[in-house]
Image (cartoon, coloured by chain):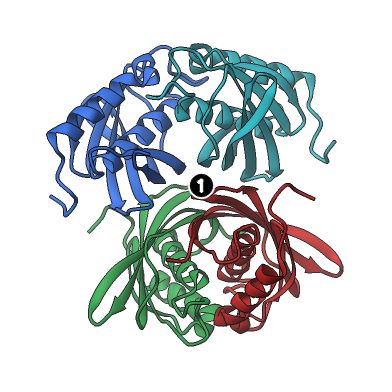
Chain colours: A cyan, B blue, C red, D green
């Protein structure tokens, strides 16, 4: 529960369509499994084609789903006709991305008319245990229709 | 020209093999086109499967090649038996990734035994013109063999 | 409550002496009001000499106490003879530092032998109400005695 | 030389007055020694009251002058009636701040109507030799008069 603008059915559908239109999410096998007012959750398998040189999840995968989770968390509290873009995002990598599945949870830290500050945490699930592998903090810019 | 340890043939080969072992780079169509002492250059087409919802390069692609360019720049100045890992990376997105090709140039800002500070700049090439689309700064940790 | 190494009386005293030895904290009027295993709290008045051009808390003040709160949170879980240094810190400024007092709360996100990932949140207290004005995330390097 | 809007006499005076109005800069003994279109330079002695526990420059000092150098670089290319605020700034600390004087050089990486991306580099001068001790990258938001 939070104090953000509630998620409208229009925005819920808009987020799902926008996510589906990101071909990178399809390439990575990522799915949006949850979206609510100010929070999201994205799951992605660690596909054979998403790995770094030691066979773990590539930081590009971790970043991609963390950034998307954070961005859609920001979008979820915007007016229905707005868009958001990432302007900056820092990722701290906490542990190797071992296992079969990554889980990214995005949330809004501070809403704003001009900027929205967001966070995402990424976990690697292996044998039912989740390890916190990355923390992202960043800034989204809202865009109103012209 | 810089004052870093020169790139040995052993390290040159090690970097090319490590890059080739990153299945994510293959998925993204990325190629290491240059590596020298403290600098690298990676090219990646903006594939149909690497896009965000407006058809531009996904930030995950921009991050993935920028992070790799920065990481291999750090590795290039390490002793031949060392590895490096990204511990943190901030990306500032400067412009949309429009066009057909992204170019990431990595460099070492400050070498160190315990940490190496790195930077990467990413450009989008369209009709022969390069636009600076992202700046990344981050930290790599060297690992010696155990 | 957390799973970090408990704070020993030796470390508690070491942290208080280290804080007292930071002349910048004295200049800024900052006080360490709490330290436990993995968490700290620092208070600083917004002195007449700590302001930016509009009369609010200078970002340098906000950063200084946030960085110290995060650093001592990391130190609190180290062996008694270790030190830590900040290697990188990002600050997201969320709101102007209005009021009479800033409060920085530091915590450890991920302990490690080679690196400790930390966070600090800074609040401005005005008429009994606390506003979240900054979020800092960063990396501390532990140093063992040589 | 760069392609940014030239610095007007009005803006030059505005920047100097704004800097003088930052009481924190006075507390730290900092001086704006150069301002041009898209670049600035600030000097600060490492005062007895600006130190960390080992007697070196406190990261709060390094951050404060780096942030100001970056911010005024952004302001220098704005229309005369605009202001800017820092929204985020990452600092990578490269070496201890030893010596008598810190020098911060700010520059604009990417101008914009809604956001300006900036960088600052901080050097410690000791016996005539400058050591690169910090790199800052961040984002400034312009504000037009209401």
Q: How many numbered circles are shown? A: 1
For this rendering, which residue is in front, D146 or D17? D17
Q: Is residue B18 above or below residue A143?
A: above
The residue drawn where x is 49% and y is 50% is C114
Q: Is residue A55 above or below residue D2?
A: above
Q: Is residue B87 above or below residue A45?
A: below
- Judge from the rendering whether residue D111 lies leftward or rightward of residue D85; answer left or right: left
Q: Is residue B101 visible?
A: no
Residue C67 image position (x, y, % from top left): 58, 63
For this rendering, which residue is in front, A23 or B96? A23
Q: Which residue is mark 1?
A: D114
For this rendering, which residue is in front, B24 or C47? B24
Callout 1 crowding tier (Cα within 10 Å): few <14, some 14–19, many ≥20: few
For this rendering, which residue is in front, A23 or B2? B2
Q: Secondary structure at mark 1?
A: loop
Q: Is residue C46 above or below residue B141?
A: below
Examine the image and state in which quarter residue C121 appears. Answer: bottom right
Residue D102 image position (x, y, % from top left): 37, 76
- Judge from the rendering whether residue C40 lies leftward or rightward of residue D146; answer left or right: right
The residue drawn where x is 30% and y is 39% is B82
Q: Which residue in the rendered view is the most extreme toward the bottom?
A: D48
| Chain under disc 1 | D
Examine the image and state in which quarter residue C96 appears. Answer: bottom right
The residue drawn where x is 43% and y is 18% is B50
> What is the quadrant of the C terminus of chain C in the image?
bottom left
Q: Is residue A92 visible?
A: yes
Residue C5 image position (x, y, % from top left): 68, 54
Residue B100 image position (x, y, % from top left): 31, 20
């Amino acid at each position: 529960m939070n104090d953000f603008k509630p998620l409208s059915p229009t925005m819920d559908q808009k987020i799902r369509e926008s996510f589906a239109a990101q071909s990178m999410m399809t390439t990575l096998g990522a799915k949006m499994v949850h979206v609510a007012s100010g929070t999201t959750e994205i799951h992605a398998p660690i596909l054979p084609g998403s790995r770094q040189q030691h066979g773990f999840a590539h930081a590009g995968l971790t970043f991609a789903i963390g950034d998307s989770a954070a961005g859609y968390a920001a979008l979820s509290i915007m007016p229905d006709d707005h868009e958001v873009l990432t302007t900056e995002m820092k990722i701290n990598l906490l542990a190797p991305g071992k296992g079969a599945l990554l889980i990214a949870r995005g949330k809004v830290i501070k809403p704003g008319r001009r900027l929205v500050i967001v966070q995402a945490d990424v976990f690697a699930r292996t044998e039912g245990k989740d390890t916190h592998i990355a923390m992202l903090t960043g800034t989204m810019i809202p865009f109103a229709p012209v």
